[in-house]
Amino acid sequence: LRTCRGLAAGPEMHFGFQTVTEEERREKIYQVFETVAKKYDVMNDSMTLGIHRVWKDILMHKMNPCPGTLLLDVAGGTGDIAFRFINYVRSVRQKQLQRKLKHHQNLSWQEIFENYQNDKFNSLGNSQVVVCDINREMLKVGKQKAQHLGYSEGLSWVLGNAEELPFDDDKFDVYTIAFGIRNVTRIDLALQEAYRVLKPGGRFLCLEFSHVSNPLLSRLYDLYSFQVIPVLGEVIAGDWKSYQYLVESIRQFPPQEELKAMIEDAGFFKVDYENLNFGIVAIHSGFKL
Amino acid sequence: VRCQHYPPVRALRASSALRRASDEHKKEPLTASSQQHFDSPPAGHQPEEKPQGPHPSYTGQGGQESEDYESEEQLQHRILTAALEFVPEHGWTAEAIAEGAKTLGLSVAAAGMFHSDGSELILHFVSECNSKLSELLEKEQKLVQLGEAEKKPLDEFLRDAVEARLRMLIPYIEKWPQALSVLLLPRNIPSSLSLLTSMIDDIWHYAGDQSTDFSWYTRRAVLTGIYNTTELVMMQDSSPGFQDTWRFLQNRVADAVTVSSTASQVQSTGEAVVQGLMGAAVTVSNAELLLNVS
């Protein structure tokens, strides 16, 4: 990085196990994701043996969104959470419509057909998800995936920084950040922004790698992380260093209780967390009350 | 591994959702003077060690008058109360809670604070009904003490009390079987059972020191049996104004009250009550099966 910026570049931070300045960290992380964007999903599957899908499903289940929910998925890159949200809301809406129709026992076939027609154009019940990511490449991959899988309704893609979101106050019902907050340089700013853009009563959900307290499991996990994952990175994505960064950044990330305290500091209430797989991953939840 | 959050004296900020307690028109349930009466906290939440009233707040820089902000629990109560309006349409579900939150100006995501099976909503409703019953009984007692009303005979008193309490279910009667099955979930049994027993104790307390030959436990068991069986009869009653239910209730109370003091009859009543409860449990689980099938 340009040395003439050295002095003004800001305080020392960690980038994996290296020490860098804030500016350098942002740049490096941007480059990491620029490089891995195309192989991001494949790598996720191979590293976690597909379990990341279950984690994301659990997150969606925990959210239990009802139709009409406005979701902001930050660092949503390739759209995993967004697509799951759309599927979930669609099926809830289906059940709602079925129940409504069941109640109207004495409708004629004509009326039932009209009812169905009207609601057909509202299959998501006005739910919407905005996917926000700082990285253009990740958004590009996400948009392509959406097109390929046939998602169009209720979906928007916005380029933005989690530390400074391009949205108004009090807009969203739910804010999620899945495996993204680890890469944010100023986590406190991101949390404050999350608080700002959520409606009163809105929910903050964070899915992230966390700390394993069980010592035996922790050793196995470390072994797997440092020996296997970078190798997979080299073999599949041709990029050892990015995946080295990944596993190091997981170790540098604050543990469950510390993150909980940070979330509370941002102003959220009823903050708690749920460990998945003994703490390999944790879901933190808070409400703006 | 879940971690529950205990909010001690964190600064409750001036947010739009947690509003001043002074704004809220006080509809606090008048807790009766009965020593056995207590309000059980909703299942799934640890009882918080904080005073029942609003938190003392943090005065501004200028030392203005201290304003009181409500606690999270009070907000949750408000949401659940608002949600009751939507139960006839949506059932005892997270959807009803979401609609309730919407009427308070909160996001629908606030329903995420509660269990998705509606446990807290149902327990809240039961607790509110019990409080209303206590209020009613206390008012009646005052009237009797002031000499403005006659003291009712025991069987009439019990009958009226149980009927008054069961009538509170009428607006929700369609979805009540669903609620009963949720209350029987192992997770909820401690709370639902304690709510039930405290309500029964309350009724007996206001029934006064009528000379009966029952011991305290038998009295409790007998009235619990009467209440539960009448409730179940009410679920399946389609007569106008539930008159079949009230007649059933009248008969049960009459039976119980005229039982003589001989030990064997007390014992057989106890056995009958146990059988009644078992039958009740079977009926409810059947009702639940029926609900799942329909």
Image: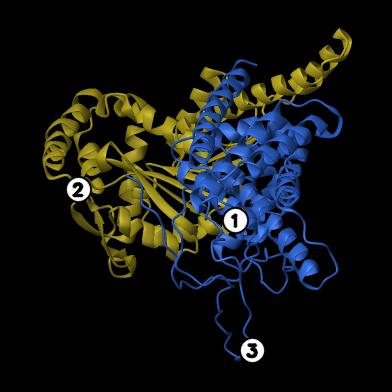
Chain colours: A yellow, B blue
Q: Chain of mark 1?
A: B
Q: Chain of mark 3?
A: B
C-alpha separation, residue under disc 2 versus residue under disc 1: 33 Å
Report whether A65 appears left or right of B89.
Answer: left
Image coordinates of residue B61 in percent, x first then y, are 57, 88
Q: Which residue is mark 1?
A: B76
Query: At x 86% / y 29%, what residue is drawn?
Result: B240
Q: Which residue is mark 3?
A: B64
Q: Chain of mark 2?
A: A
Query: At x 76% / y 19%, what residue is drawn?
Result: A101
C-alpha separation, residue under disc 2 versus residue under disc 3: 48 Å
Looking at numbered disc 3 in the image, what kind of residue is underneath it?
Answer: Gln
Q: Which residue is mark 2?
A: A213
Residue nearest the observer in this picture, B115 or A146: B115
Query: At x 77% / y 36%, what residue is drawn?
Result: B246
Image coordinates of residue A146 in percent, x first then y, are 53, 24
